[in-house]
C-alpha cells in the first residue's frame, strides 16, 4: 500500500558514487566486468536487433488515427496476440490468440527476417482478458485487509497470474476456488508496496532525473509558500525527481509523479539543495495538476515552470546518464515513446532508470499491467489502483550501499517521478517512477525518525500518446527539441 501521509523522504547529502558505466548508460556495480554485465550486454544486443523489427511489423498492421495523430493501437494488437522476450534463450516469443490476417503477415515477415530468433506459440488465454482479471484478483485481495500485499500481475511466459501476498491457507484456497488454481501462481510474501519520494544542484540546463523538492511544515497537509526556510530543519524537506518536459499552448511543464504534486497545487517547487544557508535552492515553478486521484488513475503530475528565478534557465529533452555527479551531466537525448510509432514494451524488455537517489540502475520488465494500490486521500485506506509497469532490478546492476550490498535495488526514496527509458533501440522514454516494493529500509539523515525505503522492484507510470491525450489534451506534447530552450520563452 502507498500512502500520502508519512512518506519516507530523502534528506540532502545521501548520494552514492564510484559506480562505473558502459555506453548507452548500462550500469555496472563494480569496475570489473561482472557476469551480470556480460549477460546484460548480450540481452541488449539481442533486443536491439529483434525489437525494432517486431515493432515495425506491428506498426504496419495496427496503425490508426487518433485525432490528428497516427498511433499504433496496441490494445487491438493484444486482442490478437502478445509477445515477451526470453532473454535466457535469446528468443522473441509471439503468443497468438487469434490467427488473423494481420497476425499471419507479421509472423511471415518476422520469420523471414529473423529466423530462429522468433518463436511462435499458441496463447492459452487472451492477454486483454487476463489483465482485466488481474484487476479483479487485486480487488479481492485488497478486500482481505492483509498486513502485506506486494502485488499481482499477468505472467506472459507462464500464462498465469502471479500473486505475492501474506496469505494464509484459507485465503489461498479462496482465490483458487474463485479464479481457478490453473490460472494462479501464489507466493507468500511479507513485502509491501511503497511510493518513493535526489541530484541536488541547481543546474542552468534542466533535464530528466534531477532532484526537485517541496517543503513541509508540521505535516504533509500543512504547507507554506514562504520564501524563508524554517530554521533549515531537514525533516521539512521532501524530495522527488523530474521525469521530462512537455509543452502545451506554448507553456512549458515539468512532468513528475502525480503523488508529488497532489497536495502542492499552486505551491512552489524548488530545485537544488534546500539545507540551511544554501544559496543553491531556487523556485522553479508551481504545482499545476495531478492525476493521483480516484478519477484520473494516473500517477502523473505537472509543475508549471516559471518565475523570476527561471530567467536565464533552460529546459531540454536530455536526461542524466551519469551517476549522481554534480557536473551537469544531463547528456542523454530522450526519444519519447509517444513519438516512436509502435513502441511496445513487454515482459522481458530491458530498461534503465536514472534517479537522483539510486543513480542509474538496470532492470527487466516483469509486467506491463501491474496493479499499484494507493491511498490518494490520506485516510490510510487504498482507494485507487494504478495500472503500471513493474520493473525488477538485474542483480548486480542495481543500487547498493555498505549495508545492503546485493546491488539489486531498482529505485528508492527520492526517485519518484524520475526518468525510465528503454535500454535498447535508443533512449526511448518508457515512463516515470511511481513507487516500488519495500525491500530495504534505513534511517535517513533528516532526524526525527526519517526512514528511507528502497525496492528491488519499481512501479513505473507508463507514458503513451493515448493516456496523455486523454487526460491532458492532444496538444500536450513531450519536448523533443534537440537544443535547450529558455524557460521564459515558453510562458503561454
Image (cartoon, helix red, strand yellow):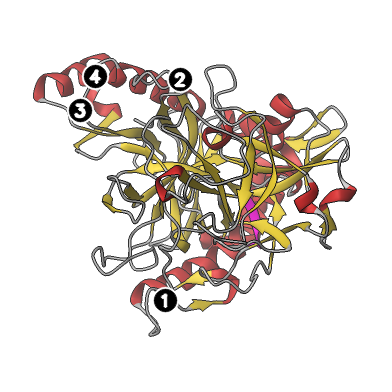
Within 10 Å of disc 3 (Cα), the crowding (few <14, some 14-19, many 20+) is few
Residue in view at x 33 percent, y 60 percent: 408
* Distance from the alpha carbon under mark 1 to that under mark 4: 43 Å
Residue located farthest toward the bottom when viewing the structure as drawn:
32
**Residue 145's disc number:** 4
The residue that appears at 59% across and 60% down in the rendered structure is 50
Residue pointed to by mark 2: 377
Q: State yes or no: residue 11 in magenta.
A: no
Cα separation between marks 3 and 1: 39 Å
Snapshot quadrant of residue 58: top right
Closer-to-camera residue (157/197): 197
Mark number displayed over residue 147: 3
Instruction: State the image quarter where residue 2 is shown.
Output: top left
Q: Mark 1 vs mark 2: which is more N-terminal?
A: 1
Whole-percent x and y of residue 269? 62, 43
Instruction: Give the crowd class for mark 4: few <14, some 14-19, many >=20 residues within 10 Å.
Output: few
Q: Nearer the viewer, mark 4 or mark 2?
A: 2
Residue 94 appearing in the image: no
Label 4 – label 3 distance at C-alpha: 7 Å
Task: Specify the segment rendered in magenta.
Answer: 425-429
Q: Position of residue 450 (x, y in %)?
A: 32, 46
Which residue occupies 30% across, 44% down? 438
- Percent across and percent down for residue 276 are 50, 56
Q: Nearer the viewer, residue 183 or 343?
A: 343
Asked if residue 471 lies left or right of residue 241, the reply is right
Question: Sequence order check: which comes first, mark 2 or mark 3?
Answer: 3
> Nearer the viewer's eye, disc 1 or disc 2?
2
Q: Can residue 171 be seen? A: yes
Amino acid at each position: 500500500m502507498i500512502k500520502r501521509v508519512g512518506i519516507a523522504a530523502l534528506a540532502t547529502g545521501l548520494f552514492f558514487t564510484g559506480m562505473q558505466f558502459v555506453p548507452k548508460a548500462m550500469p555496472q556495480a563494480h569496475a570489473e566486468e561482472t557476469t551480470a554485465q556480460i549477460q546484460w550486454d548480450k540481452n541488449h544486443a539481442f533486443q536491439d536487433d529483434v525489437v525494432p523489427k517486431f515493432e515495425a511489423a506491428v506498426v504496419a498492421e495496427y496503425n490508426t488515427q487518433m485525432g490528428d495523430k497516427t498511433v499504433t493501437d496496441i490494445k487491438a494488437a493484444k486482442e490478437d496476440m502478445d509477445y515477451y522476450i526470453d532473454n535466457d534463450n535469446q528468443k522473441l516469443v509471439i503468443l497468438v490468440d487469434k490467427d488473423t490476417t494481420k497476425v499471419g503477415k507479421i509472423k511471415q515477415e518476422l520469420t523471414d527476417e529473423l529466423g530462429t530468433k522468433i518463436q511462435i506459440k499458441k496463447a492459452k488465454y487472451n492477454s486483454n482478458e487476463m489483465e482485466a482479471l488481474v484487476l479483479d484478483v487485486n480487488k479481492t485481495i485488497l478486500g482481505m485487509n492483509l498486513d502485506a500485499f506486494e502485488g499481482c500481475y499477468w505472467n506472459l511466459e507462464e500464462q498465469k497470474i502471479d500473486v505475492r501476498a501474506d496469505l494464509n491457507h484459507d485465503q489461498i484456497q479462496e482465490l483458487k476456488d474463485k479464479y481457478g488454481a490453473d490460472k494462479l501462481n501464489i507466493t507468500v510474501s511479507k513485502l509491501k508496496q511503497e511510493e518513493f519520494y535526489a541530484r541536488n544542484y541547481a543546474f542552468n540546463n534542466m533535464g530528466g532525473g534531477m532532484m526537485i523538492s517541496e517543503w513541509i511544515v508540521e505535516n504533509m497537509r500543512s504547507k507554506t509558500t514562504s520564501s524563508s526556510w524554517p530554521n533549515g530543519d531537514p525533516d521539512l524537506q521532501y524530495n522527488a525527481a523530474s521525469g521530462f518536459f512537455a509543452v502545451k499552448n506554448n507553456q512549458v511543464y515539468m512532468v513528475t509523479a502525480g503523488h508529488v504534486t497532489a497536495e502542492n497545487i499552486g505551491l512552489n517547487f524548488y530545485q537544488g539543495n534546500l539545507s540551511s544557508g544554501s544559496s543553491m535552492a531556487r523556485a522553479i515553478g508551481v504545482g499545476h495538476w495531478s492525476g493521483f486521484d480516484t478519477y484520473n488513475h494516473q500517477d502523473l503530475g505537472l509543475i508549471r515552470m516559471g518565475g523570476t528565478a527561471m530567467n536565464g534557465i533552460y529546459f531540454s529533452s536530455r536526461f542524466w546518464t551519469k551517476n549522481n555527479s554534480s557536473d551537469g551531466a544531463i547528456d542523454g537525448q530522450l526519444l519519447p515513446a509517444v513519438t516512436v510509432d509502435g513502441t511496445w514494451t513487454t515482459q522481458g524488455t530491458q530498461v534503465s532508470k536514472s534517479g537522483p537517489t539510486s543513480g542509474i540502475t538496470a532492470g527487466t520488465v516483469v509486467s506491463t499491467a501491474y496493479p499499484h494500490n494507493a491511498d490518494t486521500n490520506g485516510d490510510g485506506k487504498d482507494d485507487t489502483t494504478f495500472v503500471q509497469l513493474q520493473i525488477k532490478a538485474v542483480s548486480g546492476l542495481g543500487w547498493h550501499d555498505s549495508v545492503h550490498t546485493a546491488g539489486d535495488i531498482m529505485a528508492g526514496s527520492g526517485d519518484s517521478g524520475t526518468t525510465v527509458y528503454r535500454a535498447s533501440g535508443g533512449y526511448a522514454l518508457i515512463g516515470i517512477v511511481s513507487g516500488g516494493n519495500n525491500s530495504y529500509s534505513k534511517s535517513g539523515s533528516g532526524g526525527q525518525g526519517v526512514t528511507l525505503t528502497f525496492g528491488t522492484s519499481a512501479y513505473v507510470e507508463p507514458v503513451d500518446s493515448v493516456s496523455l491525450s486523454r487526460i491532458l489534451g492532444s496538444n500536450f506534447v513531450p519536448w523533443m527539441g534537440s537544443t535547450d530552450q529558455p524557460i521564459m520563452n515558453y510562458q503561454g
